[in-house]
Image (spheres, rainbow, N blue to C red):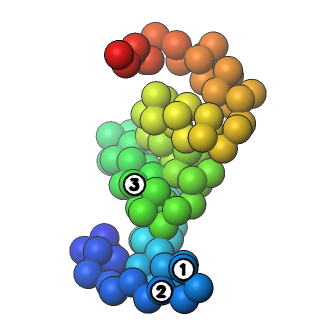
Amino acid sequence: MLRQVAIRTPTIQIRGKAYNRQAAFKSTAHAFMQSARSNLDAEITQRCYQSAAECCEEAVEILEAAKAHKDAANYMQSALLFRQLGMFNEVHALILTHGQSFTLQT
């Protein structure tokens, strides 16, 4: 429900920055993260973190998105976002601990 509200929220441009829609996605991401932390079902928790990660990307909260993708066990996307931020130690750690989850892209 929150995600649909965020999607429908218009974007207001102020000095080249989009505010309302980003704020709505950020709020939605935090709601998904809270749900993930309070849920005992591993599958639901993983889906909540995945939804949070997607909302963080829409809100241009790249670090939070990378962390949420990691919590959702989406290690490839997490590594790509950490790489985009120049956080190569995190990328290296992901490769060492979850290398079997990575696929080569051509």
Q: Nearer the viewer, mark 3 or mark 2?
A: 2
Q: Residue furthest right?
A: 89
Q: Is residue 51 left or right of residue 69?
A: left
> x and y percent of residue 87 in the render?
71, 36
Quick check: marks 3 and 2 in contact, CB under 8 Å? Answer: no
Separation of marks 2 and 1 at Cα, in angstroms: 6 Å
User: How many other residues sit within 10 Å of disc 3, few (<14), some (14-19) or many (≥20)?
Assistant: many
Check disc 1 and give the amino acid type: Gly
The label shown at residue 57 is none
> x and y percent of residue 27 in the render?
48, 75
- Work out whether 29 lies above or below 22: above
Separation of marks 3 and 2 at Cα, in angstroms: 22 Å
- Work out whether 73 lies above or below 95: below
Q: Quadrant of residue 85?
A: top right
Residue shown at 52% from the left, 13% from the top: 99
Check disc 3 and give the amino acid type: Glu
Residue receiving disc 1: 16
> x and y percent of residue 55 in the render?
41, 61
Residue shown at 58% from the left, 45% from the top: 67
Residue receiving disc 3: 54
- Work out whether 95 lies above or below 81: above
Q: Earlier in the sequence, mark 1 or mark 3?
A: 1
Residue shown at 62% from the left, 51% from the top: 63
Circle 3 sits in a helix, a strand or a loop, which is it? helix
Quadrant occupied by the N terminus: bottom left
**Res. 35 in view:** no
Separation of marks 1 and 3 at Cα, in angstroms: 22 Å
Circle 1 sits in a helix, a strand or a loop, which is it? loop
Q: Quadrant of residue 46?
A: top left
Quick check: marks 2 and 1 in contact, CB under 8 Å? Answer: yes
Q: Is residue 82 left or right of residue 26?
A: right
